[in-house]
Image (cartoon, rainbow, N blue to C red):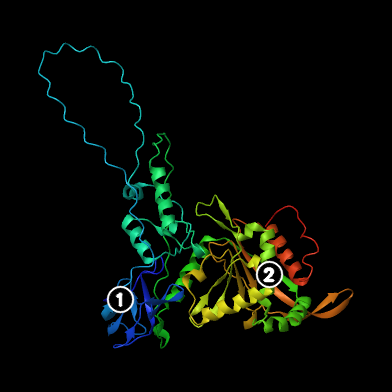
Amino acid sequence: MEIRLPQVAEGADSGTVVNVLVKVGDTVAPNQDLVEVETQKAVVSIPSPAGGQVSQVHVKEGDTVKVGQVLLSLAGVEGAEASAEPEPPPPPTAAAPPAPAPAAPVPAAPVPAAPAPAAPVPAAPAPAAPVPAAAVVAGAPAFPVVNPEPVAPPGLRKQARNLGIDLSRVRGTGRGGRIVVEDVRNYIAALQALAARPPVVATAVPAPTPAAVPVAKAPPVDFSRWGTVSRQALTPLRRIVSQRMHQSWSTVPHVTQLDNADITELLALRKKRAPELEKAGARLTLTPFILEALAKTLRKHPRFNASLEPDGEHLVLKDYVHIGIAVDTEAGLMVPVIRDVDKKGLLELAQETERLAEKTRRRKISPDELQGSSFTISNQGALGGGHFTPIVNHPEVAILGVGRASTTPTWVDGKVEARQILPLALSYDHRVVDGADAVRFVRDLVALLEKPDNGPSKPAPSGKKGR
């Protein structure tokens, strides 16, 4: 039996082998991990579909492998298991209409002169018949992209490819937005309903086609003219980060709102509660407090917890609060997601933050745990950073940058005191959020951080919106 690289993420047609977990002669059990491959932003383990003995290993660490490439071979295979994911049934197709019976021959007869033809009467349109899925997919207009990086099992991906279905346009209802069989069925049904509608004939003046704007590319430079150089290939993770940052910066009109929060009282509360949480096995940092305050602020300002659809005409307001935490790893930046932040207390947030950060640094995070965020935090405090301008994690509409708190002389109640001041930076999509909205959002967040026990004493002042 040959073990090949499956397609584990949409758009990922290759990966890099980071670890070979077995060697020739090893006996493996069904579902035992054989090889670890870096693809997209995660290291994915490739399990054995059956038990057997490793007869040959075709790859080594550092190899670039493509989907379908043989990783290793098994001998003496017993009890090969069927895929855990059910194959979707073939899509419904229209029944072929019965062939008309042949007409009986009519004897020839003299034909009288035909009267003058009457004005033609338009025939009534025939009722729409069900349309086969393959024809629908080939000819129907595409639905908008709802999930740029869809997650689906290999069997379902194969069926989608056979039907020509773009899974990025299928809304997943499984855990973490995972696409299941029923989602594909619903998508095909929607396409069939759209294709079965009678065509609307209208006369319109075609809009002029804008002239194509050439994309300027920098000419290559021979840097070796000025000294010794070396070339280093970007890792798969670095390439993905590069592409996404370019997409976000090219698509989103960024504006950044800067502010400071006096977290002197918050740090005192952290010191007070830290022993209690440590007994429960959690290390209490500043991040869980920021998450808690941010979830309340997002509930109050739902536009910051939304996404703009690709048509630019609809805003998707999300009922959930899933916050991504930017984690610095040796391989580059990764963003695991903490789900339902608004429903969790400090203990749960502290435990989950630490667990996900550790999995991410060890590159054991799963693709599902890197998707589905509605807002993102980038905290540079541990590195000593101050104010900075983070780039929005598209398709979100805002991101919060957090710097390092510093002791700052501050005027309080008529006297100067040494206070702990935390720098904050909110970058947002100006297509969705106005400047005044951003000010109110940040001021409400600051109020929660400055008074962690009581929350904001009053909402930020409202007024005429402006940049």
Q: Which mark is residue 199?
A: none
Residue found farthest to the right: 414
Q: Residue at x 17, y 11 (%)?
A: 113
Side (left or right) of 118 relative to 86: left
**Residue at horizontal 43%, vertical 36%?**
204
Q: How many marks?
A: 2
Q: Residue furthest left?
A: 108
* Residue 211 in sight in this render: no
Q: Could you tell me residue 95's position as x and y percent?
A: 29, 42
Vertical order, 103 against 46 (above or below): above
Above-or-below relation of 89 to 77: above
Marks 2 and 1: CB-CB under 8 Å? no
Q: Residues within 10 Å of mark 1 (few under 14, many from 20)?
A: many
In percent of width and height, residue 127 lies at: 36, 33
Along the viewing direction, whichever of 105 and 330 lies nearer the viewer = 105
Q: Amino acid at mark 2?
A: Glu
Above or below residue 193? Residue 50 is below
Q: Nearer the viewer, residue 323 or 443?
A: 323
Residue 266 placement, left or right of 8: right
Q: Position of residue 421 (x, y in %)?
A: 74, 77
What residue is disc 2 on? 292
SS assignment at label 2? helix
The residue under label 1 is: 3
Q: Give the camera-side residue of 232 and 184.
A: 184
Q: Is residue 184 above or below residue 393?
A: above
**Which quadrant of the rendered structure holds the N terminus?**
bottom left
